[in-house]
Image: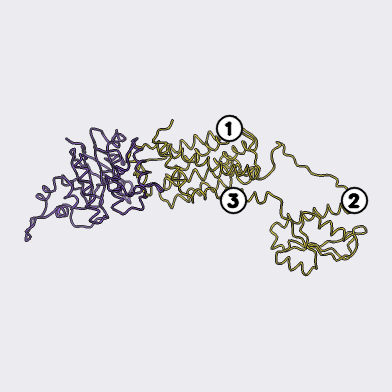
Chain colours: A yellow, B purple
């Protein structure tokens, strides 16, 4: 299937990549930071630091204070309003609840004051909402009244509802795009600039041998790096892969092929090392925004949705999401696999039509 | 017997600043090189020396005329031609992170050959540097390594493109000796150079190119007799540099 020349050159490309430790680490850095962030926010949330000022002496206010203190959402500090205000200004407290002197819920509605430093509270709306919900449940407990209903969320496809489950496939697609384009586009321009390609092409190596070796080496690199991220996501974030690993890795391989081909084209457009970066950025950046990596394409304005769906990163990200979240198979023909077939044909046609070896090597 | 036969070789490029017009970088040159010769191509910058070499090496398309190497037409058998030639380029850049041994083995694989890298490194006096990276070598060592890379396929013809540019006299002399040794072992060598002393010392025959044309071709002594100015007050005769300046003028080229 592969000649010994192609296999040896692929081995050399792998050796060069793995000897460049900095590059290996940087390629893993972005997805690992994301996983780390999810690991951090995926656990129990930090309690809200709440100052409690009780200006009332009645029993109701005492019971109310005890219920607030027992709520796991809050880390309560009792004290004088002036002291707690200072702590609030320093950022040591998130909010202060002030119980009025005449606190009584039986005869009339009492006004609880919530003091905040809006400049220091980043998620003000969410915190206000959380405090409000907790206080309402405390009120119900005080009044001995049962809630009218509780809300149980169920996904129509009975899949996990976490954001990481949505994000991970998109992140893997984004990672493979970057690794592939760096492996073809950037490398080609660099090898050309330094005269390395010229040195190679005075030997009997044919362009197809060179392309096959790069594709082979880069596919293995992408599969290995994706495996690391995927392994960590499964082990640490309890991500479940609903489909088969064969389909998943098949999709990654096809995606790598598409982006390697497109990377070769970008590399042949760029005449200099300085030009390749903006050219590659203008290709990858819109995809990062419009390809539904971080949020669903359906939440975008309707006018951009057809464009967004057609982008190669969207097709790969959707394909991976179908496999990871919905247990889809790569072998079942649907609009996503049709999109992949179209992009494979388009990218391969473009690379064979417009990639001029004589110009690249000279 | 000729190992290289070049006839009316032509290479055109768009005129800088006026893409509609073309100029001939190599303008219909004809020459033959015999088996076992060291053949030098001399010329000022922009004369067309490297372009000529690149057409013979299959790196540049031939726009007109023909080039036959060892009975193979370069235009139609470029990969077969590449199998029997060794090329040392002006630029000596290689893949990062690989040492000399790994690079030689790689180049050997590109010819589908298993090579003895130590034997090659010994030939160019770099055996002690087998684990070094090319960027750790001196200028002369880099040029010698470049020749080692060109020898991995034991070529019939070795092309050297300005092999001693930028080298100190010792390194230069060392490289000349290497070229002489390879030639003594039967290898045909084609070299381009700016260095008149090099051409005179190494070459059996010299072609002088200017503005894409071949303006003179002979043995070094033959050229001196034909073109060097008559010595007026000096007892000694002129040299190849005198020939070169007499033919191409004293005007500075880029």
- Say which of A314 and A176 sits in front: A176
Query: Which one is closest to the eye, mark 1 or mark 3?
Result: 3
- Say which of B23 and A34 sits in front: A34
Alpha carbons under labels 2 and 3: distance apart: 46 Å
- Say which of A215 and B66 sits in front: A215
Mark 1 and mark 3 in contact? Answer it, CB < 8 Å. no
Task: Pick out the residue farthest to the front.
Answer: B128
Label 3, residues with CA under 10 Å away: few <14, some 14-19, many ≥20: few
The chain that hosts pointer 2 is: A
**What residue is at 28 percent from the left and 45 percent from the top?**
B122
Label located before the other in sequence (2 or 3):
3
Which quarter of the rendering shows the N terminus of chain A? top left
Residue A144, numbered label: 2
Alpha carbons under labels 2 and 1: distance apart: 56 Å
Marks 2 and 1 share the same chain: yes
Q: Is residue A43 left or right of residue A112?
A: left
């Amino acid at each position: 299937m592969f000649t010994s020349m192609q296999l040896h050159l692929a081995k050399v490309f792998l050796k060069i990549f793995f000897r460049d430790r900095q590059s290996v680490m940087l390629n893993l850095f972005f997805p690992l930071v994301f996983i780390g962030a999810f690991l951090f926010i995926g656990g129990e949330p930090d309690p809200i630091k709440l100052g409690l000022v009780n200006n009332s002496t009645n029993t109701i206010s005492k019971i109310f204070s005890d219920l607030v203190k027992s709520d796991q959402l809050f880390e309560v500090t009792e004290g004088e309003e002036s002291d707690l205000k200072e702590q609030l200004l320093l950022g040591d407290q998130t909010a202060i609840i002030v119980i009025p002197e005449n606190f009584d819920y039986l005869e009339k509605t009492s006004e609880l004051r919530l003091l905040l430093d809006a400049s220091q509270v980043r998620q003000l709306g969410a915190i206000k909402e959380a405090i409000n919900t907790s206080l309402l449940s405390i009120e119900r407990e005080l009044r001995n009244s049962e809630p009218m209903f509780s809300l149980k969320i169920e996904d129509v496809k009975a899949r996990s509802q976490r954001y990481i489950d949505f994000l991970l496939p998109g992140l893997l697609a984004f990672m493979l795009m970057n690794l592939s384009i760096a492996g073809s586009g950037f490398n080609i321009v660099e090898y050309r600039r330094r005269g390395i390609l010229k040195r190679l092409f005075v030997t009997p190596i044919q362009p197809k041998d060179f392309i096959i070796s790069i594709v082979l080496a880069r596919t293995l690199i992408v599969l290995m790096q994706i495996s690391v991220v995927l392994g960590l996501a499964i082990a640490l974030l309890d991500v479940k892969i609903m489909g088969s690993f064969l389909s998943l890795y098949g999709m990654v391989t096809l995606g790598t092929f598409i982006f390697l081909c497109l990377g070769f084209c970008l590399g042949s457009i760029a005449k200099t090392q300085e030009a390749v970066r903006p050219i590659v950025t203008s290709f990858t950046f819109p995809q990062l925004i419009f390809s539904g990596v971080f949020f669903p394409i359906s939440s975008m304005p309707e006018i951009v949705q057809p464009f967004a769906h057609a982008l190669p990163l969207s097709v790969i990200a959707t394909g991976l999401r179908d496999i990871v979240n919905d247990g889809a198979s790569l072998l079942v023909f649907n609009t996503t696999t049709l999109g992949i077939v179209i992009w494979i044909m388009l990218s391969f046609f473009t690379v064979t039509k417009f990639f001029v070896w004589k110009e690249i090597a000279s | 017997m000729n190992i290289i036969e070049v006839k009316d070789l032509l290479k055109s490029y768009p005129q800088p600043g006026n893409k509609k017009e073309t100029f001939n970088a190599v303008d219909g040159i004809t020459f033959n090189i015999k088996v076992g010769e060291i053949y030098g191509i001399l010329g000022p910058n922009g004369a067309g020396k490297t372009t000529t070499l690149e057409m013979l090496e299959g790196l540049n398309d031939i726009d007109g005329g023909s080039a036959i190497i060892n009975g193979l037409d370069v235009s139609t058998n470029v990969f077969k031609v590449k199998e029997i030639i060794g090329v040392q380029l002006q630029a000596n850049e290689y893949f990062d992170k690989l040492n000399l041994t790994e690079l030689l083995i790689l180049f050997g694989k590109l010819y589908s050959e298993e090579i003895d890298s130590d034997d090659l490194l010994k030939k160019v006096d770099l055996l002690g540097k087998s684990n070094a990276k090319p960027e750790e070598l001196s200028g002369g060592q880099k040029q010698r390594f470049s020749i080692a890379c060109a020898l991995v396929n034991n070529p019939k013809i070795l092309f050297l493109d300005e092999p001693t540019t930028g080298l100190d006299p010792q390194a230069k002399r060392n490289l000349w000796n290497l070229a002489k040794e390879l030639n003594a072992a039967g290898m045909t060598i084609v070299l381009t150079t700016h260095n008149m002393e090099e051409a005179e010392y190494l070459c059996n025959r010299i072609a002088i190119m200017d503005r894409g044309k071949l303006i003179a071709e002979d043995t070094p002594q033959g050229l001196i007799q034909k073109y060097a100015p008559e010595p007026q007050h000096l007892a000694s005769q002129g040299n190849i540099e005198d020939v070169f300046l007499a033919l191409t003028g004293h005007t500075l080229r880029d």
